[in-house]
Amino acid sequence: MITVLAALYALALAVLLVYGLNLLVLSLTRIASDRLRPGTPPPDPEAAPPHSDDDWPAVTVQLPLYNEAHVARRLINACARLDYPKRKLDIQVLDDSTDDTTERAARCVRHWQERGVDITLIHRDDRNGYKAGALKNGLRLARGELIAVFDADFAPQPDFLRRIVPRFDDEDIGMVQARWGHLNDDRSLLTRLQALGLDTHFAVEQHARHAVGCFINFNGTAGCWRRRCIEDAGGWHTDTLTEDLDLSYRAQLEGWRFRYVPALEVPAELPPDLNALRAQQFRWTKGGVKTARKLLGRLWFSDNPLGARLQGAMHLSAYGLYPFVLVAAALHAPLLVSHAVAGAPGLGFFTAMSAGLVGFAGFVLALVVAQRALYPDWKHRLRALPLYVAGSMGLAVSNTRAVWQALRGRRSAFSRTPKHNTHSGRAWHESRYALRCLPAVAWAELGAALYCGLGLVALVAVGAWTALPFQVLFTVGFGLAAAASFRQAQS
């Protein structure tokens, strides 16, 4: 039995090591790609804009909404104020709402129509295909040759289109992605921790992959597509929960090139409560694994360079890591206690497993590099790094369930992330969309926290001092997730 458990533990650490090493490589690539002072935005070598308004291409801006009463006006107002030739701008409010969001959006649309803005409300009575279905439906009526997309929690600056449209200076550029910023990252510890993770994706992963010519992805919002690219790749598909990732890889496999503009930031609202974050992460994880199942084979047998295929495979399969985190958390303490008491597995096993620290270093370095690249006060922000690492482990229970459902092919509804407009001062629990219920997974997270806590006591008892830091991270991570859920259920 010890041999079997040791083999499972070794497998988990080996997988985590591979992905950690990949983050290490991406971090070093990001460092090598520019030599910026801490907190200095990357240069923005914009392509030359058209000389006159008549030369700008027609753009359709799509705003998918579903029960977004708190933020719909903010989004519509921001997009109506985009600085772009009026005759070339077409705004679609793609509303699938079942509450008074539709009425609020309609009033806002009429307000801007009276001021000469070409904006329309397209309401569907069903959610067929969810967000992908709404975008697909709107594309039939769009008049733009470029298609920009913004989710309800975003607030683009007026110059967004003036800065992103010139990036389509080559006919094979299919999509240009901007970097996400944050409206409320200072609102709470939870929003600060989320900002750390998103910053790492945009400032390290997207940046490095783009710098070396590997595939990148449209992040579902704050980006702009060439319409021909969408159509050539087969349009929006509704068979995954991550239609953005799905279309991104299909388009690049057809030969379209993508661009990432790190200097173009679009701020957005982060989920202020754990239930909303857990639902978002569950959707991203399940959709990511489903997309990997769908496209990994096609990617691997494509004629793209080996490096691009390897990096794409790492990217597509990254959400599948969570089960391995759970295995490592479950077996870490028992194997060390077994070694201390019975001498099995042997010292050589744990010496070999210490290589996993290199992978962990890659994970930490990516966080550090991202914060240093984006913020002058990066050292201050990194004080939350240990809690971020622990919190990432804490979501492993819920996200492992998402992986399992995706591998089994189980279908589920598109669970939207509630937006509460906390940037305006509203407390999240005062929102009509607040998820106050106690999800069943919280009990599993509590059980995992107690289990890891017992493991922590056992490691102290046998004097396995070097193993304590990781056991503490497991215990704190699951404990934070469970405690936040129980606290929210009482709010």
Image (spheres, rainbow, N blue to C red):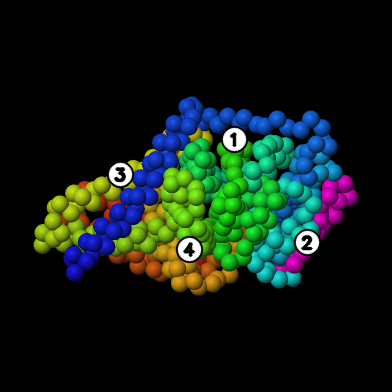
Q: Earlier in the sequence, mark 3 or mark 1?
A: 1
Report if the CB atoms under discs 4 and 2 are less than 8 Å apart.
no
Task: Give the residues in magenta.
Answer: 98-124
Residue 307 appears left or right of 175: left
Front residue of 57/489: it is 57
Report if the CB atoms under discs 1 and 2 are less than 8 Å apart.
no
At label 1, which amino acid type do we have?
Ala
Q: Earlier in the sequence, mark 4 or mark 2?
A: 2
- Mark 4 to mark 3 CA distance (whole Å): 28 Å
Farthest-out residue, left: 342
Residue 245 appears left or right of 466: right
From the image, which quarter does the N terminus lie in? Answer: bottom left
**How far across and down, in percent of the image, does residue 234 sit?**
64, 59
For residue 263, which numbered disc appears in the image? 1
For residue 358, which numbered disc appears in the image? 3
Within 10 angstroms of label 1, few (less than 14), some, or many (20 or more) residues? some
Within 10 angstroms of label 2, few (less than 14), some, or many (20 or more) residues? some
**How far across and down, in percent of the image, does residue 365 sit?**
39, 40
Helix, strand or loop at label 2? It is strand
Helix, strand or loop at label 3? It is helix
Report if the CB atoms under discs 3 and 1 are less than 8 Å apart.
no
